[in-house]
C-alpha cells in the first residue's frame, strides 16, 4: 500500500494540491498563534531604566479575587490590576541586610512633561519624572551635574534633543497639571533605548511633586560581585515573605517599569488561544473536505483494487499514507511563513493596544512542533473519514457508484448531526436565557461551530434540496446551460457538498464573528458612553488637571455642568460579591454636584449629589444581590489594591451586564496611577452653540499645556477596550476566513480540473466552449448560493440570541456592507476557481480531452 500511495501521489499530483495547501496554510497560522501564546505566557519585558539592577522588587500587579470562604485559597482567580500597586520604600532597609546585596534603591515615578512653545515634548509612550538617586539603576551616563538642589532637572538625551535644551538652559515642566520652570543641570544618556521619556529631579523636588509620596514603584537591587542572582532572589523572597510583592530577575524585571504589560497578558493568551482553536477547527474541516474530494475522484480505482483482492484495511492504510506524505511535506514547509507571520501578528496586536509593545516577542521551538503535529493530525483524521466508505463498499457497487455517488447517509452522520444540532440549540437557549451582557459571546462563539458542524454533516442532503429549489430559476434564465448545470449539481450532490461545506464554513464564521463584534461595540457605546452627557470634553496629555480646574471651567460662560471624570476598575469585597470574579467592576469617578447632569442617570433611591468623600452609587441589581441600601457601608478593592470603606448614597437602574459603580472623582483619582483626573466633561447651557463653547474653553485653558478640547467621542470609557479588541478580532477572523476561502478555491480548482474528460465529451457531441463555460457558471453560482445560504443560517442561529441579550432585539448591529462583502468574496472566489481551471481544461482538443485520464 505504501508503494501504491507513492505512485498515486506521483501521477495524481493535482488531486492532492488542495489538501497540501490546506495543511500548509493551517500550520502557518497555528505556528503564528503559538508564538502569540508563548509570548503571553512568558511575558518577557526586558528592563530599560532598571537594567543595572540584578533583582527588582515590585508590587504584584494582579489581584487574587477571594472566595466566599476567605480560608479557601484553592484555585484563586488572579486578575490584573487597573492601576499601579505601590510598595513601601522603607523595605529598602530590610533588603539591604540580605547577604549578597551591595545596595538597594527605591524607584518612584510620576507624570512629568517638558513643554516647549506651549506643546508637550514626549519621546515614546509617556514622560515620567524620577528621583535622581534611581538613575544609577540604569545606569545613565551624565553630562553636566546631578540635580543637587530644588529647581534643577536632568533630561534624558532624547527629550533634550527634541526640546532643543542644553545644560544651563531653563525649561518648563508640567507636573500635576501645573507648569514650573526648571534649570537643566545635566543631560543623561540611557544604557539602552527606552520607550519613555525620563526626567530626574532632586530628592526634595521628587517628594514634593510626586502625588504618591511615601510609596515606591519598585526597589532595584544590585548584587555584590560573584553573587548568584537566582539564589539572591530566593533570599529576598524569604526575607520579605509577602504575597503582594514579586521579586523579579532577567527579562521579568521590565514588568516593574511597565505594569500595563501584565494586564495585556490576560488579553493576549485567550485571544491567541481562540484564534488557534478556530484555525484548528477550520483546518480539520477543510482538510477533510479536500481529501474527501480527492478520494471521490479516485473511487473507480479504489473499487478496482477491491475487486482484485485488496482488503478494506489496506484501502484505509493507503489513504492514510497518502494523506501522511502530503501532510508531512506541507507541515514542514508551513513552518516557514509562520516565522514571518508570528512577529507580524504580534506587531499588529501590540499596536492595537492588546498588549504593551515593550513585551518581547518569543516564538520558540514549541510552536514549530505543535503546528506541524496539529496539521498532520488533522490530515490523518480526515483520511480516516474519507477512506471509511470506499473501503467498505462492495467492489461491484463501488465501480458502479464511482461515476455517480449517491449514498451519503450513514449512522455516524445521523448520530453526530443530531448531537451537534442539539448542542447548537442548547447554546442558543443558554445564550438567550442565562447570559447577560458581553459574556454572552462565551456561548455564542462555540454555537456557530456547533451549527456549522451539524450543517456540514447533512450538507449533501441540503445541497440536493437547495439545488432543486434553484433549478427552476436557473433553467428559466439560462436555458440549456441552466438545465445541464442543475442536473450536474443535483446528481453530484455528494461531491458538490465538498465545495459547499468550506464556503458555508467561511461565510458562517465570518458573519457570526464580525456581527458579534459590531453588536458588542454598539452595546458598549450605548451603555458606557451614551449615558454621559458631555457636549465638550477636555483631555490632558500631561498627566491630569489640577483640582481647581473644574471650578474654573464650571464658571465659564455657556457652561451648565462640569465634572472631573476618572475611570478605573475594582471589586466589592464586603459583602461578598461573586458576580465579578473573572473581571473587575468598571468604576467611574464624577463630581457629585454635577453627577446627575453629566451622567443623565436618574437615581431610583438616594441622591447622586451626595457623592462626596467616601461614598458610592451602586446599580440597582448590585444593591439587590448584595442586600444593601442607602446608608449601608461596603468595602471596595480599588484598582491600586487599596481597600476603601464607602457608604451607599444612591442606587440607579443600569443595563444588566453593562453596570458601572460610581464614585467621587477625587476618591478614584487618588487611587489611580497618575493621581489626577485626566478628563473633564462639560455640558452646555440650553441654546449655547457647542463649537462656540469649545472655542471659549480653548481660550480659558490656553495656559495649561497639553489640554485638548474635543467633542463627546473623546470620552474615555470602558467601550474603548471593546473597540481596541474589535479591530484585532476583525483581522484574525479575516485571516481565518481568508484561509478557508483559499482552501475553497483550491478545492474547486481540483474538482473542475478533474472534469477534463467530461468537458471534452460534451464538446465532441456538439457543445461549444462558450456553452460549456456557461454550464460551469451556473454550477458555480449554485454552489456559491447554497454555501452562502447555509453559512447565513449558521450565523443567524448564533447571532439572534446574542443580539437579543446584548441589544434587546433579534437583529444584530452592523452595516449590511459587511454581509455584502463576505458574500461577494465567496461568490467571486467560487466563480474564479471554477471558470479559470475550466477554461484551461478546454484548451486541448476535444478528442484528446475525451480520452484523458480522470
Image (cartoon, rainbow, N blue to C red):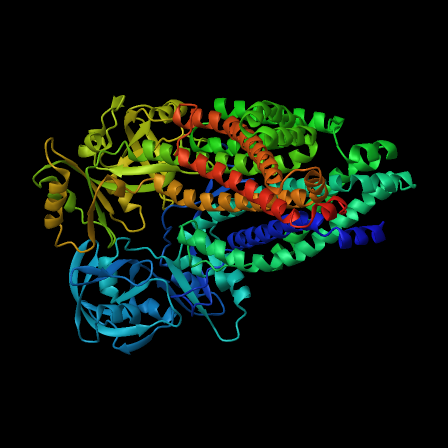
Camera-nearest residue between 457 and 53: 457
In the figure, 27 relative to 339: above or below? above
Q: How many marks?
A: 0
Residue at the front extreme of this rendering? 766
Picture residue at 66% right of the left edge, 53% below the top: 372
Side of 853 relative to 759 (left or right): right
Picture residue at 48% right of the left edge, 58% below the top: 247
Residue at the right extreme of this rendering? 309
Camera-nearest residue between 713 and 599: 713
Residue at the bottom extreme of this rendering? 143
**Residue 224, visible in the rendered structure:** yes
Q: Quadrant of residue 191?
A: bottom left
In the figure, 508 relative to 738: above or below? above
Picture residue at 58% right of the left edge, 23% below the top: 472
In the figure, 771 relative to 356: above or below? above
In the rendered image, residue 380, in percent from the top left (x then y), is placed at 73, 45
For the C terminus, the quadrant is top right
Amino acid at each position: 500500500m505504501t508503494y501504491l500511495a507513492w505512485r498515486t501521489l506521483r501521477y495524481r499530483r493535482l488531486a492532492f494540491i488542495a489538501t497540501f495547501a490546506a495543511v500548509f496554510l493551517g500550520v502557518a497560522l497555528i505556528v503564528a498563534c503559538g508564538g502569540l501564546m508563548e509570548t503571553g505566557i512568558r511575558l518577557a519585558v526586558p528592563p530599560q531604566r532598571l537594567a543595572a539592577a540584578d533583582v527588582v522588587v515590585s508590587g504584584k500587579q494582579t489581584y487574587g479575587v477571594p472566595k466566599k470562604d476567605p480560608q479557601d485559597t484553592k484555585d484563586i482567580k488572579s486578575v490584573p490590576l487597573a492601576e499601579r500597586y505601590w510598595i513601601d520604600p522603607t523595605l529598602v532597609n530590610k533588603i539591604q541586610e540580605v547577604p549578597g546585596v551591595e545596595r538597594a534603591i527605591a524607584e518612584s515615578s510620576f507624570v512629568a512633561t517638558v513643554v516647549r512653545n506651549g506643546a508637550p515634548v514626549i519621546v515614546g509612550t509617556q514622560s515620567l519624572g524620577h528621583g535622581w538617586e534611581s538613575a544609577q539603576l540604569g545606569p545613565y551616563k551624565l553630562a553636566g551635574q546631578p540635580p543637587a538642589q530644588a529647581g534643577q532637572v536632568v533630561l534624558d538625551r532624547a527629550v533634550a534633543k527634541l526640546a532643543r535644551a542644553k545644560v544651563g538652559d531653563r525649561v518648563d515642566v508640567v507636573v500635576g497639571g501645573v507648569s514650573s520652570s526648571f534649570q537643566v543641570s545635566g543631560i543623561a544618556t540611557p544604557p539602552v533605548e527606552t520607550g519613555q521619556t525620563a526626567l530626574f529631579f532632586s530628592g526634595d523636588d521628587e517628594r514634593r511633586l510626586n502625588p504618591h509620596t511615601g510609596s515606591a514603584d519598585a526597589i532595584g537591587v544590585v548584587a555584590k560581585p560573584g553573587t548568584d542572582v537566582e539564589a539572591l532572589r530566593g533570599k529576598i523572597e524569604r526575607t520579605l515573605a509577602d504575597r503582594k510583592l514579586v521579586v523579579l530577575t532577567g527579562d521579568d524585571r521590565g514588568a516593574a517599569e511597565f505594569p500595563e504589560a501584565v494586564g495585556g497578558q490576560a488579553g493576549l493568551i485567550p485571544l491567541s488561544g481562540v484564534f488557534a482553536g478556530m484555525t484548528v477547527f477550520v483546518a480539520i474541516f477543510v482538510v477533510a473536505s479536500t481529501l474527501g474530494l480527492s478520494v471521490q475522484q479516485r473511487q473507480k480505482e479504489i473499487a478496482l483494487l477491491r475487486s482484485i483482492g485488496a482488503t478494506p484495511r489496506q484501502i484505509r492504510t493507503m489513504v492514510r499514507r497518502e494523506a501522511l506524505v502530503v501532510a508531512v511535506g506541507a507541515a514542514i514547509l508551513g513552518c516557514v511563513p509562520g516565522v514571518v507571520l508570528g512577529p507580524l501578528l504580534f506587531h499588529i496586536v501590540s499596536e492595537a493596544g492588546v498588549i504593551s509593545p515593550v513585551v518581547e516577542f518569543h516564538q520558540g521551538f514549541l510552536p514549530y512542533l505543535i503546528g506541524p503535529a496539529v496539521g498532520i493530525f488533522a490530515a490523518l483524521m480526515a483520511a480516516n473519514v474519507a477512506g471509511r466508505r470506499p473501503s467498505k463498499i462492495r467492489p461491484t457497487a463501488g465501480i458502479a457508484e464511482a461515476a455517480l455517488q449517491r449514498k451519503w447517509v450513514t449512522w455516524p452522520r445521523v448520530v453526530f448531526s443530531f448531537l451537534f444540532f442539539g448542542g447548537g440549540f442548547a447554546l442558543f437557549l443558554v445564550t438567550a436565557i442565562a447570559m447577560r451582557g458581553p459574556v454572552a459571546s462565551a456561548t455564542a462563539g462555540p454555537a456557530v461551530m456547533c451549527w456549522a458542524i451539524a450543517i456540514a454533516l447533512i450538507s449533501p442532503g441540503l445541497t440536493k434540496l437547495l439545488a432543486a429549489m434553484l433549478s427552476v430559476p436557473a433553467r428559466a434564465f439560462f436555458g440549456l446551460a441552466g438545465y445541464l448545470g442543475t442536473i450536474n449539481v443535483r446528481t453530484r450532490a455528494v461531491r458538490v457538498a465538498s465545495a459547499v461545506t468550506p464556503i458555508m464554513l467561511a461565510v458562517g464564521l465570518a458573519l457570526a464573528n464580525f456581527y458579534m463584534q459590531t453588536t458588542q461595540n454598539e452595546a458598549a457605546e450605548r451603555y458606557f458612553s451614551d449615558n454621559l452627557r458631555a457636549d465638550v470634553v477636555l483631555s490632558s496629555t500631561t498627566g491630569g488637571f489640577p483640582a481647581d480646574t473644574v471650578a474654573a471651567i464650571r464658571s465659564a460662560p455657556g457652561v451648565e455642568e462640569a465634572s472631573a471624570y476618572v475611570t478605573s476598575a475594582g471589586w466589592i469585597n464586603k459583602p461578598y460579591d461573586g458576580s465579578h470574579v473573572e473581571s473587575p467592576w468598571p468604576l467611574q469617578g464624577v463630581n457629585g454636584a454635577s453627577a446627575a447632569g453629566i451622567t443623565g442617570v436618574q437615581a431610583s433611591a438616594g441622591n447622586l449629589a451626595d457623592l462626596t468623600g467616601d461614598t458610592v452609587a451602586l446599580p440597582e441589581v448590585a444593591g439587590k444581590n448584595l442586600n444593601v441600601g442607602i446608608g449601608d457601608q461596603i468595602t471596595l478593592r480599588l484598582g491600586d489594591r487599596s481597600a476603601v470603606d464607602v457608604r451607599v448614597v444612591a442606587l440607579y437602574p443600569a443595563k444588566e451586564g453593562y453596570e458601572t459603580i460610581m464614585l467621587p472623582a477625587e476618591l478614584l483619582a487618588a487611587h489611580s496611577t497618575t493621581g489626577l483626573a485626566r478628563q473633564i466633561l462639560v455640558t452646555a447651557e440650553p441654546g449655547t452653540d457647542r463649537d462656540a463653547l469649545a472655542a471659549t474653553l480653548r481660550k480659558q485653558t490656553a495656559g495649561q499645556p497639553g489640554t485638548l478640547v474635543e467633542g463627546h467621542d473623546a470620552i474615555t470609557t470602558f467601550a474603548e477596550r471593546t473597540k481596541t479588541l474589535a479591530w484585532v478580532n476583525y483581522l484574525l477572523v479575516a485571516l481565518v476566513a481568508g484561509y478557508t476561502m483559499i482552501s475553497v478555491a483550491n478545492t474547486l480548482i481540483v474538482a473542475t480540473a478533474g472534469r477534463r474528460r467530461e468537458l471534452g465529451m460534451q464538446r465532441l457531441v456538439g457543445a461549444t466552449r462558450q456553452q460549456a463555460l456557461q454550464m460551469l457558471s451556473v454550477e458555480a453560482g449554485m454552489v456559491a448560493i447554497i454555501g452562502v445560504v447555509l453559512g447565513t443560517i449558521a450565523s443567524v442561529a448564533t447571532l439572534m440570541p446574542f443580539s437579543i441579550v446584548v441589544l434587546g432585539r433579534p437583529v444584530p448591529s452592523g452595516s449590511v456592507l459587511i454581509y455584502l462583502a463576505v458574500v461577494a468574496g465567496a461568490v467571486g472566489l467560487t466563480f474564479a476557481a471554477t471558470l479559470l481551471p475550466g477554461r484551461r481544461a478546454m484548451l486541448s482538443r476535444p478528442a484528446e480531452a475525451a480520452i484523458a485520464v480522470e
